[in-house]
Image (cartoon, grey):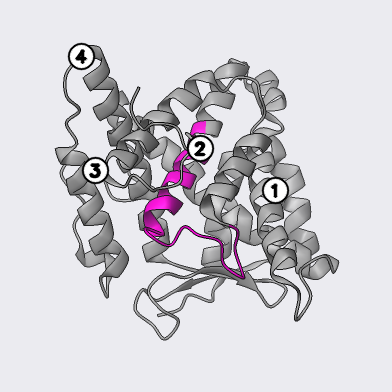
Amino acid sequence: MTDTSSAANSAVQFLLDGLAPERKTELAALWEKYGPEFQLMDDDGPDGAFILEGGLFRLIRFNHRVLRLFWFGSFIAWEGYVALHTSLISNGEINLQRFKELLNVFTQILTAADSTTVALPAGIPEPGTFPTDPEARAPAELAIFCSGWALLHEFKHIQHQQDGTSAPYEASADEVRSEEFSCDEFATEYILSTVSKYAAESSDPEDKVHFKRALGIYFALFTMTIIAKDRWSETDTHPSLQARISNIRKHMGPENLQLADAIAYAAFAALRVLWPNAPSPLNGQSPLP
């Protein structure tokens, strides 16, 4: 049943506040100005299985399947990194058996009439559950940035529409694709551009804060890649996923990214062992060192 109450709005605002607590006042002002209305839709309805879209000047629709996929995608990206990292340390062959199993379950969630009927694999909690074990907790915390980045992207579409800067009716494909780049950039910069302020207010090391947020964005890109399997090319409505990944990487900035780059590259490299043509921050390089 579609949730049109204020519950979805409150939940999303709470999530976005957690992504960048230092911007809470700014987010409240954006909320007041644009009045977004978030709707949680049915998994199996007339609008299809995967719903994540912003339109009609204030409406942002999503379903539980989307949230579950972005959560789970973070764990799959982490598994890819661990598999490749382990093989390099042991100087052995990369073991992608569990990685493959997770991808198979991901596909089941993507296609099931009711995504909640597909059990997550052992060791992976349901969305919103944060394990105490640091190794298992890491992808859970990063998953929040995955889903938050995706929702911020849609929020920017609403801003464009109300500000009169969205691609107009009968716009060219280039104009439509340009808006997608703009929304990607907004979501990325929203999460990363005030890291120094958060670090000063929290006394957390700035490089660690930046690393965690950047890696969360990378894992959102990883999740988008596996959601769109074999549909990565440019269309009339979206740039190619490779172009989006490359552009987002540019807007993530040159500093404090070495570790985030390394982990993300490993996750995507593991994926490209299985799907050689998948887009990646590797940008055409060999998937293995």
Of 160 and 123, nearer the camera is 160
Residue 45 position, x and y percent, is 38, 82
Residue at 33 percent across and 27 percent down: it is: 288
Quadrant in the rendering for residue 91 = top left
Magenta-highlighted residues = 215-239
What residue would you read off at disc 1? 186
Which disc, if any, is residue 283? 2
User: Mark 3 and mark 1: span between their CA atoms?
Assistant: 30 Å
Mark whose residue sits in front, 3 or 2: 2
What residue would you read off at disc 4? 91
Q: Amino acid at mark 4?
A: Asn
Residue 55 position, x and y percent, is 65, 74
Quadrant in the rendering for residue 190 = top right
Q: Amino acid at mark 3?
A: Ile
Residue at 25 percent across and 70 percent down: it is: 112
In the image, is residue 68 above or below residue 26? below
Of 159 and 245, nearer the camera is 245
In the image, is residue 278 above or below residue 62? above
Q: Secondary structure at mark 2?
A: loop
Of 76 and 207, nearer the camera is 76
Q: Amino acid at mark 2?
A: Asn
